[in-house]
């Protein structure tokens, strides 16, 4: 550990597991470290210097931050040095079950492994939804080619294939024909060691639903709209993704009740969750999946601007001492994600910035431009972003459209 202090019983001791010091992770770590009175030690494979100016009380190197036995040993040893551990935190989707198991072993408050697995195992999640009457896509866990073929014959095309423990649209793809199904099964069929979740493809408008639960009750929520869906963006490299947070949420009152029932079915007691859902053409809603962690892709930044507050700091207080003061939506806000175009290997230039109208430039509140000579990420949330906000939702949507129609990230 880089710094030690004597244990003071009234001060909460927080261990934050951050296997790698990614930019988004560092921002969450800093928010927790800045909570008044919190003593924060980060467990990471990266050196403490990678966490910048976050006011940490310690840093503990761990070779594998995803191995539950290594984590349990490290947390126990650091806890002995600090005089106990009050909270064990981490934001990564693929870390939640391990954190839950360590909490169980060491008696640390928070979500245990069973609840964490309800969120992580998408097949288990869908079974809980079905039992609770939560509307969702028809799905099936498959561990062989014949099982996949049987699902296709029953449900029809298209359907979506995704890992049981996936996150968002990553490693997810659409199967829309016998030929596509045959290609998949010929190259990487599901098996007992790596089963897949096959899911009915839902048509409609895709949204997210981010909410805070305290004592098993929903105390706050935010709704955003995807323009278009992340899966569509992944399948079409020329599409630039946008996310819109409308100023008013009145038209989405029905999803609040469905989301509350879904989170209660999964057993979520406290914390911030990220849900993806669809509004079907007939107006009904269907839940896609939920993560027991804060959203990625700069959603916390977008929600902060929409509510004119610091949601990173609010999340940190929630996780440290259970306090959350629900903010009020004051603006519409949106993110335009700048995605490298073309088949080159490095980003060469950013074109069109000087062509963006003054009206749109006046609505820009934050920009992160791709770095020249950087390698394109190939992800749906791209290589940079532009955040805009305005009291009028239509003005924000128009600004997003102008940005993705005008600005182009070139590769060479």
Image (spheres, helix red, strand yellow):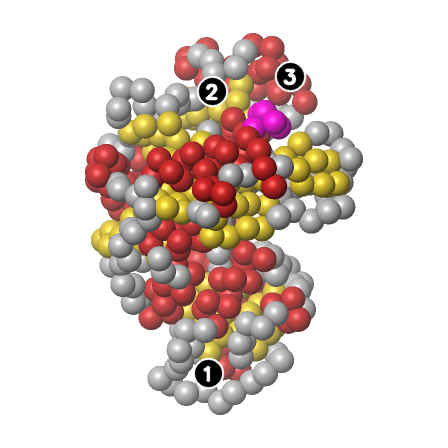
- Looking at the image, is mark 3 or mark 1 earlier in the sequence? 1
Number of residue marks? 3
Q: Disc 2 designates what residue?
A: 159
Label 3 crowd bin: few (<14), some (14–19), many (20+), radius 10 Å: few
The quarter of the displayed image where residue 112 is located: bottom left
Q: Which residue is mark 3?
A: 183
Is 223 colored magenta in this rendering? no
**Residue 237 on the magenta span:** yes
CA gap, disc 1 and disc 2 = 52 Å
Spot occupied by residue 311 in the image (x, y as percentages of width and height): 39, 59
Q: CA distance from mark 3 to mark 2?
A: 15 Å
Task: Pick whichever, 43 or 355, lies toward us.
Answer: 355
Give the magenta range: 235-240
Q: Earlier in the sequence, mark 3 or mark 2?
A: 2
Tell me if residue 275 comes above or below residue 66 in the rendering. Answer: above
On screen, 65 above or below 352? below
- Estimate the x, y position of residue 386 in percent, counting from the top left: 52, 45
Q: Which mark is residue 83?
A: 1
Q: Looking at this view, is 145 or 84 the one in front? A: 84
- Secondary element under disc 3, as helix, strand or loop, is helix
* Residue at 23% in and 34% down: 251
Considering the image in quadrants, where does the N terminus appear? bottom right
Residue 105 vertical placement versus 79 (above, below): above
> Which residue is at the front of the view, 276 or 155?
276
Q: Is residue 296 visible?
A: no
Question: Are the two marked residues, 3 and 1, in contact with CB atoms closer than 8 angstroms?
Answer: no
Mark before the other along the chain sequence, 1 or 2? 1
Q: Residue at 51% of width from left, 68% of height from top?
A: 30
Give the secondary structure at mark 1. loop
Q: In front here: 201 or 192?
A: 201
């Amino acid at each position: 550990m880089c710094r030690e202090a004597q244990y003071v019983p009234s001060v909460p001791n927080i261990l934050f597991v951050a296997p790698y010091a990614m930019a988004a992770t560092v921002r969450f770590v800093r928010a927790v470290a800045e909570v008044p009175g919190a003593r924060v030690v980060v467990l990471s494979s990266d050196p403490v210097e990678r966490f910048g100016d976050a006011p940490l009380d310690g840093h503990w190197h761990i070779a594998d931050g995803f191995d539950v036995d290594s984590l349990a040993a490290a947390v126990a040893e650091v806890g002995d040095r600090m005089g106990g551990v009050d909270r064990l935190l981490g934001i990564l989707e693929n870390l939640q079950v391990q954190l839950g198991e360590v909490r169980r072993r060491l008696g640390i408050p928070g979500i245990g492994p069973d609840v964490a697995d309800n969120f992580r195992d998408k097949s288990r999640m869908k079974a809980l939804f079905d039992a609770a009457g939560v509307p969702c896509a028809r799905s099936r866990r498959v561990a062989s080619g014949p099982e996949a073929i049987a699902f296709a014959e029953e449900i029809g095309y298209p359907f979506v294939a995704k890992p049981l423990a996936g996150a968002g649209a990553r490693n997810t793809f659409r199967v829309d024909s016998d030929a596509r199904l045959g290609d998949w099964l010929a190259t990487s069929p599901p098996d007992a060691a790596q089963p897949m979740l096959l899911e009915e493809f839902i048509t409609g408008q895709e949204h997210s639903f981010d909410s805070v639960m305290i004592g098993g009750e929903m105390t706050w929520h935010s709704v955003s709209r995807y323009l278009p869906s992340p899966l569509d963006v992944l399948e079409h490299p020329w599409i630039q993704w946008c996310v819109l947070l409308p100023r008013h949420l009145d038209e989405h009152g029905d999803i609040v009740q469905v989301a509350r029932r879904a989170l209660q079915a999964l057993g979520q007691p406290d914390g911030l969750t990220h849900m993806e859902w669809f509004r079907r053409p007939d107006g009904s809603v269907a839940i896609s999946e939920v993560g027991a962690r804060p959203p990625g892709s700069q959603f916390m930044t977008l929600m902060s601007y929409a509510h004119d507050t610091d949601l990173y700091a609010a999340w940190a207080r929630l996780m440290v001492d259970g306090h959350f003061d629900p903010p009020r939506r004051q603006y519409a806000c949106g993110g335009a994600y700048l995605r490298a175009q073309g088949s080159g290997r490095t980003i060469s230039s950013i074109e069109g910035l000087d062509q963006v109208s003054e009206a749109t430039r006046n609505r820009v509140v934050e920009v992160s431009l791709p770095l020249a000579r950087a390698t394109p990420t190939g992800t749906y949330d791209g290589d940079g972003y532009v955040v805009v906000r305005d009291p009028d939702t239509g003005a924000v949507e128009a600004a997003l459209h102008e940005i993705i129609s005008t600005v182009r990230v070139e590769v060479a």
